[in-house]
Amino acid sequence: MPRDDLRGPALSRARSFRVRRLTLVSVLVGSLMLPHAVWAQPSRGRVPPGASVHPFSTVVEAIAAARGLLRDGRPAAAVTLLDRQRPAWRRTPDLLATRGLARFQLLAPALEPASARALSPAAQRELAALEPTLTRYGSSHPDDALAALTLGRLRMVLGTLETAASAFEAAGRADPRDPTPWNDRAMVLVAMHQLPEAERSLLRATERSGLDPEPWDNLGAVRLARGDARSAVDAFRRACELAPTTARYRSDLGAAQLASGSPRDAIASFEAAAAASPGDPVVLGNLGYALSLGDRLDAALATLRRAAALPGHSASIEDNLGLVLLRQGDRAGAREAFQRAVALSPNDARARTHLDSLNAP
């Protein structure tokens, strides 16, 4: 069986793109932040459930307090605070929108296109109902970057990708310093197979990213998907410079170096990634693949066996293990590896073809 049948390296995560959770760097424009001691004091008596609690003189102050809770990562407390304000305040568009931001965080859908389908029907209905509320709010508050970012993510998880991209662009205009909207916009564009525009969006993100390596790593992934391995190497290398101990950035760099025709550099990157994260099957699988290309079959076999022994390893690792065993003349061991690959992924055509070729008379 030819060496070329081996499967190439995977980027070191389940998908080739990463998106960060909400970065609560924006507050309601024009809102006055109320001193903590004013609104966070314990009440002197027990508050009956559903009763109004309003130690604020205006709805703006109540919203600012809720935004403070969101920045502290306390969306449930923000919802509770808003729900206990005066009934007339609870009907205002600004309060409803802020409550929507908090509810989105509480529902916590995976930040991936159309991921809302994995939630319960009730959660899906609530997310769908939030969209017009945040859309109306965004029309009258174009400078609220957090609301625009949340609207983009809401639309993304609902699967309306074109409008999600527009919301992310609006969030990027509202806060020129934050790379997150451009990073998230690129994720949507990748899902829409608009890789050149996704690359341009990520370039904007890297201009704003400061010491954040994530947009650089995503830029490398998009460039690699476009077939521009040399430029991908530059982007991944920058991510490694910003986070030198992060294994997945090293592994991604190795994948790009291998694709650009630098196998020795790739092996060095994969070895550094494996040293930093010895329990990551993807990293070890990539290293094993690179070693096999350099005809270091004994080292490749040992590495692939380590990867295959780890929980969460993929069918491609078992398949590559089988191919290396076959090159060493171990047909029985290869057959067992191909069988495990098919068991892990029954629809994997390549692994099944390899198994059938061994079973053929």
Image (spheres, helix red, strand yellow):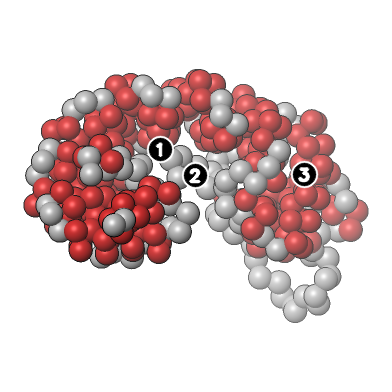
Of 152 and 65, nearer the camera is: 152
Q: In which quarter of the image is the C terminus?
A: bottom left
Element type at mark 3: helix
Residue 271 location in percent, x, y?
16, 45
Cβ–Cβ under 8 Å for marks 3 and 1: no
Tag 3: amino acid: Glu
Mark 2 neighbour class, 10 Å CA radius: few under 14, some 14 to 19, many 20 or more: few
Q: Residue at x 75, y 78 (%)?
A: 45
The residue labelled by disc 2 is: 20
Say whether residue 118 is left or right of residue 201. Answer: right
In the current view of this chain or complex, which residue is farthest to the front? 361
Point 27% across, 43% down: residue: 6
Quarter that holds the N terminus:
top left
Residue at the disc numbered 1: 214
Q: Residue 90 at what x, y percent from top left? A: 84, 54
- In the rendered structure, are the residues bearing label 3 and label 2 in contact, judged by CB atoms less than 8 Å apart? no
Tags 1 and 2 touching, CB below 8 Å: yes
| The one of 342 and 163 positioned closer to us in this rendering | 342
Marks 1/2: CA distance? 8 Å
Above or below — where is 16 with respect to 139? below
* Amino acid type, residue under disc 2 in the picture: Arg
